[in-house]
Amino acid sequence: MNCPVCGGGCVQDAPVILDSLESVFSRCDKCRFRILDKSKPLKGRFYATPCSCNKRFIDEVFAHLYVILLEEGVLSGDEPLRVVGSPLIHPGFFMTAPPFLPPDSLVLLSPIVTREAGGRIVKEVPEVKGVVKCGDYVPGLTDLFLTSSPRTYELLAGCDVRAGVFTTAAGPIVTYKQQSVMHIEFPRLKNPKIQSVERHLDTHTPGICVDICAGVGTLGLCAARHGIREIILNDAWYAAAFWSAVNLHVNRMFFRVEDVAIRTTYDALKERPVGKDPVRIAESSGEQMITVYHGDCRELWKVLPQKPLCAVFDLFEKSDKEAIERFLHEWQSRVPGEVFIP
Ligand SMILES: [Zn+2]
Ligand SMILES: [Zn+2]
């Protein structure tokens, strides 16, 4: 599958990513490293170049970024190293030691970077695959009732598509997303929401599972990993719905499906970023039926089977209790079965 953002090879099948994990960020015996104090400015304008194995310790990559930001006049040299930004590793998974980065393995999320500096970084720092200018808000759709219009970060240069690896009791799943338009999740050793869904599936064994606000599809695909026969993933945000479809495709070998068809393109969905009436954008054929919809979750009942089902309701923003109650009341008056909040 070509990457929907850059057209390149950013998106690979899950087994390719999983096979790489053991060695992707490990050092060779020639790799050298120094640990830099992130709370202090970089001393001198020095950074080491990558090792002959093409990897470089993450702190040296940050020294390189710091020097470019100095040369571009973004930094004066008095700022601590950490102001450069946050490193988002590709593929992201739970790690116990800082990584030695191969080419194209880092998306830089930075509140201070400029377009010029971003362009130079992607050209001159081989480890960086994309540079995103971020703000102090959560990108994407966070509001259940779709009253506020979603904001996104800005991709300044390169490509910001990256994979994350999540562990389930039935085996790992790999989820891709475009980082500038989706909220950030850091893979942890144990994911409480995944575990909560697994406990629920274990005791209830539903025939149909609906992931109402699916995000990039992690919980719905976790249910698929556990063999649930029919799964419906939905999100009102175009990027979440599309990456759910991509993630169904890249993990298809873990499910009892023959094929996955994606019925739209990223650019076409972006034309109407916030969905209203649900539109089916992808589905699997085979023993397990997994479908992906782009639509307002309050309209999703229109396309659901009239059978008891288990609705997983994982809302990003949970502060508006009254609104959630209203939604749940509406949902339960229309959809048979239960609602489960992980
Ligand atoms: Zn890409
Ligand atoms: Zn090396």
Image (tube, helix red, strand yellow):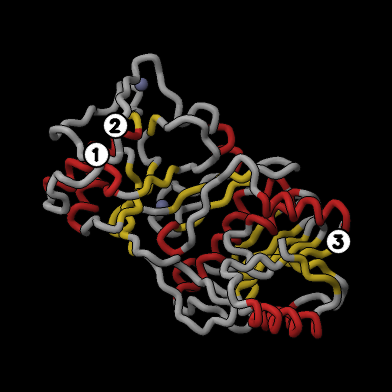
- For label 2, count other residues whose C-alpha is less than 10 Å away and answer few (under 14), some (14-19) or many (20+): some
Residue nearest the viewer, comparing 273 with 196? 196
Label 2 or label 3, whichever lies nearer to me, is 2
Residue nearest the viewer, comparing 13 with 107? 107
Q: Position of residue 62 (x, y in %)?
A: 28, 39
User: What secondary structure is marked by label 2?
Assistant: loop
Q: Residue at x 62, y 68 (%)?
A: 315
Q: Residue at x 82, y 64 (%)?
A: 208
**Horizontal side of residue 135 vs 233, given as left or right:** left
Decide: marks 2, 3 in contact (CB < 8 A)? Answer: no
**Circle 2 is placed at which residue position?**
36
Evaluate whether residue 41 shows in this view: yes
Q: Position of residue 292 (x, y in %)?
A: 65, 67
Separation (CA) of disc 1 from disc 3: 54 Å
Q: Residue at x 50, y 56 (%)?
A: 177
**Circle 3 is placed at which residue position?**
206
User: What secondary structure is marked by label 3?
Assistant: loop
Decide: marks 1, 3 in contact (CB < 8 A)? Answer: no
- For label 1, count other residues whose C-alpha is less than 10 Å away and answer few (under 14), some (14-19) or many (20+): some
**Circle 1 is placed at which residue position?**
40
Q: Position of residue 216 (x, y in %)?
A: 58, 59
Q: Earlier in the sequence, mark 2 or mark 3?
A: 2
Q: Earlier in the sequence, mark 1 or mark 3?
A: 1
Q: Give the answer, above or below, for where 217 lies relative to 46.
A: below
Label 2 or label 1, whichever lies nearer to me, is 1
